[in-house]
Image (spheres, rainbow, N blue to C red):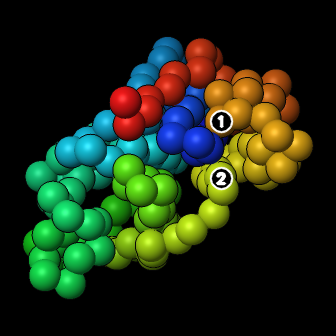
Amino acid sequence: MTTIAYRDGIMAGDSRAWSGDKHPIGSKTKVYQVNGFLVGISSSKVGETTCFLNFLKTHLGVKSIYDPEDHFKCPTTIDADREYGVQALVVDKDGSAYYWDDGQAFSGPLRADYYAIGSGEQTALAAMVLGKSAAEAVELAIQLDPWTGGEVETVSHD
């Protein structure tokens, strides 16, 4: 799967690419800046992260990801039959976070000092509890989680 962590305006993710549940097949980007939001996406389904990223590029709003005035459209308003099989974390410039887990809508806004998702999330969270940065948390997950690997990539609001 992957490990994605956020702390202090920086989102970090590993870059190992998997061919489903078989073996690593190279590297890929899993953290992005989209319309002013930091986005981390993970999935065990091949190609699903790209589909979800394309959805976000089209529908992440100008004001808030969960604005009742429809600045962000949940997938249910686009295709009621489509469920994205991803785990995603989206963080606004003000630190508000929105969590997606294999469904049709975001949870949030959430408020915390740091967040982590993916197969190495427990390792990353433990590292951040001990004061490590998002990138350091992902580096530790690379050492301990068999589904996390490659280089650490980061994005920030700057």
| Residue 62 pos. (x, y %) | 15, 58
Residue type at numbered disc 2 = Tyr
Q: Residue at x 52, y 36 (%)?
A: 10
Residue wearing tag 1: 134
Residue wearing tag 2: 114
| Residue 46 pos. (x, y %) | 40, 40
In the rendered view, tell whether residue 65 sits above or below residue 104. above
Q: Residue at x 82, y 40 (%)?
A: 131
SS type, badge 1: helix
Q: Closest to the observer: 14 or 68? A: 68
**Disc 1 and disc 2 in contact, CB within 8 angstroms:** yes
In the rendered view, tell whether residue 55 sits above or below residue 1. below
Residue type at numbered disc 1 = Ala
Q: Splitting the image into 4 quarters, where does residue 90 fall?
A: bottom left
Left or right of 54: which side holds 119? right
Q: Residue at x 47, y 62 (%)?
A: 97
Gap in Å between the C-alphas at discs 1 and 2? Answer: 8 Å
Q: Splitting the image into 4 quarters, where does residue 24 fall?
A: top right
